[in-house]
Image (cartoon, rainbow, N blue to C red):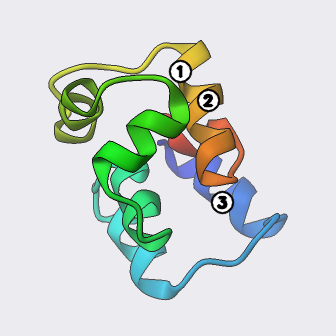
Amino acid sequence: MDAASVRSFLKNPTETFPDAVVAAILNGDQPIKALREHRLLTQAQLAKASGTSAVYLSQIERGTRRAGRKLLVKLGKALDVDPALLEW
């Protein structure tokens, strides 16, 4: 996620997140992982809710694979956030 996206989100948030979540994302942590942990979901739970596998989700969180647009939309819905926040 680029700095412009973060600034835009912070100006018009649909939801506020704890400082630790925002700080983790700004420090380079994968947004999907930070938000998943904030929602207290396991990788398996989020994978099931978004129609993907836990292995693929793990690869996305580690940065070894990228999520496609359709999956980002599903992950956004499962995490109840704008999918644009999940791009990394």
Identified at 76% across, 71% down, the residue is: 15
Provide the residue designation for mark 2. Answer: 74
Q: Secondary structure at mark 3?
A: helix
Identified at 70% across, 78% down, the residue is: 16
Of 66 and 70, the residue lying toward us: 70
Identified at 15% across, 24% down, the residue is: 64
Of 85 and 76, the residue lying toward us: 76
Indicate the position of residue 23 as horizontal and vertical percent values. Answer: 39, 75
In this rendering, is residue 42 above or below 44? below
Instruction: Name which of mark 3 and mark 1 comes first in the sequence.
Output: 3
Which mark is on residue 7?
A: 3
Q: Secondary structure at mark 1?
A: helix
> Can residue 88 be seen here?
no
Task: Kindly indicate whether the residue at mark 2 contacts the one at mark 1 (C-beta within 8 angstroms).
Answer: yes
Amino acid, disc 3: Arg
Of 50 and 13, the residue lying toward us: 50
In this rendering, is residue 70 above or below 21? above
Provide the residue designation for mark 1. Answer: 71
Distance from disc 1 to disc 2, alpha carbons, whole Å, reads: 5 Å
Instruction: Name which of mark 3 and mark 2 comes first in the sequence.
Output: 3
Amino acid, disc 1: Leu
